[in-house]
Image: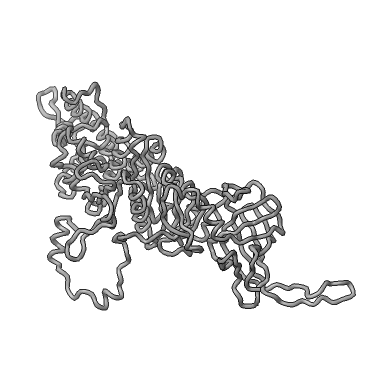
Amino acid sequence: MAETYGTKIGRVIDVRGDGMVAVLDSSEQGESPKVTIGREDILIGQIGSYVKVIQGNVSILAMLTRMSELEKLESAEQATPSKEMDFTPLAQRTIWLTPIGTLNEENEFERGVSIYPTTGAEVHAVGQDDLKTMFIKFESKGYDVGFLPSNPSVSVCLDPTSLFGRHFAILGQTGSGKSWTVANLVQQALPIMPKAHIIILDLHGEYCWKDNNGGACSAFEKCNYRHVDARELEMPYWLMTYAELCDLLVDQTDFSAHNQTAAFREILINLKEQEGSRPELELDRVTLDTPIYFDIMQLRSAIEDKNGQVLGKSGNMINGPLTGKFDNFLMRLDSRLNDVRYDFLLKPKRRDSSESLSELLKDFVGLGEPKSSVTIIDLSSVPFDVRPPVAAQIGRLAFEFNYWNPQYREFPVLLICEESHIYIPRSAEAQFKGSRKSMERIAKEGRKYGVGIGIVSQRPHEVSETVLAQCGTFLCLRITNPNDQNYIRSLAPEAERNLIDILAGLGRGECLALGEAVPIPTRIRFYKPDPPPNSDDIDFYMKWKEGLDEVDVDEIVKRWRRQER
């Protein structure tokens, strides 16, 4: 029969540690298997839908990950030694199930499966009322971000405390809806959490941009937000740690790099101690990483002195032990000082004193004028090779702000890192050492000081393992690359690893949510953000059919030279 008014839809024929196989009850030839629960007709076999496996006191919640229809040979009558067996081909629908947890007597979901059913266990459909009971866990917080694709009437509420406080990762290939997901999560958060403090590292100008008429647009125009060009914010060099400055100025492959770092260390601490001696700063001691101003031109002059010749015993200038050792250091520093793209970092106009740090931090966390819940730091105009140290500095400032904040428990901060594989890589390249260390510190220690991190990446297997391993929630969008799928599978809880197989079939803005912020492992379709970010694919067909005949090449050249988009 095609429909049934009971909830039983089949029985288990195979049980393994990582899943179960069940055959569905017979249905009429060509008919899709359905079950009616109350007034609801449920189509059986939808990938990502839920079923119950019941046997005695055991009730398992499982997700359907595969369905197939095979021919089987079944005896038309009981075989006896005196009769020949009459075999008739019949269709047999088979489903593959991944157990994700146990349902107690109150139909409440509990993670983990302690007792597995045996073959012959009944498989039952799960209706809308049952699903709502399972998803009611976080409903009281009101953080409604999407719905179940298999049952659109059931909305999904995430737990914002677990999502933001225990870190999360949004993983998916290009075009799967990562920016859409970020915009939706923030847009849905602010109405219920108006005192949020969210910092977004926007590498491509997707969340704030200019329309064709030059007008300002933003995915958060209905929210309390502030857009800041990283160059205008001015992340001054004197706030960088010694390690970050070494990443920026010292070529670690240079044969004299060890001499450069040692001399740089000595000169830097001397310059900072001079500044720290000012009585108005009220400092008892100064370290290499104390966030106080020093003059980079004085630094250059001191390095140049060490690089030059020394006075010999005869009164003549002769080569000393460090003569010429800093040629590459000075060349590297001068190239950056003479490059206008680095002016926001090396030639700050507003952040040129130790006293300017307070105003910078206020702007950074949204306490400046005007106050804002979301601060979008636009890195799209920052040179590609300097993004890692700038990102490292932003991450470190977020952590240091709350680390030294006595009210950190009352003032949590979230840092969302777009395209994180660029500056938090898995590889141990020297140029990324500072940014990796900064973000890994947040991942490992940030929870204790009210600093959360959101990792957004299209290449999960290229992101630091340390950072991803600390994420409590994974929002996995469409991923077809086998390496990325296998990497995510290795990060997921063992009982949920088979669910990763559905990632290749997800639509845009649809994800498999795993971890602490969801009541149960869930396939979610996020609400479309309003307004959406500037991340839609360009319509090549229409633009090549009806697009521009000319572009202003002279204006392109001017923007390129000025480094302005």
Q: Quadrant of residue 471?
A: top left
- Residue at the image point whose x is 67% and y is 51% from the top: 58
Task: Examine the rendering and report whether any part of residue 517 can be seen.
Answer: yes
The N terminus: image quadrant: bottom right
Relative to 175, residue 78 above or below: below
Closest to the observer, 429 or 528: 528
- Residue at the image point whose x is 34% and y is 59% from the top: 529
Relative to 354, residue 138 above or below: below
Percent coordinates x, y for residue 21 in the rendering: 65, 61
Count of labels in the image: 0
- Residue at the image point whose x is 22% and y is 48% from the top: 230
> Looking at the image, which residue sits at the far left?
315
The C terminus: image quadrant: bottom left
Relative to 198, residue 558 above or below: below
Q: Is residue 534 left or right of residue 105?
A: left
Percent coordinates x, y for residue 528 in the rendering: 37, 61
Percent coordinates x, y for residue 304 in the rendering: 15, 35
Task: Examine the rendering and report whether any part of residue 491 can be seen.
Answer: no
Q: Is residue 62 left or right of residue 526?
A: right
Q: Quadrant of residue 53?
A: bottom right
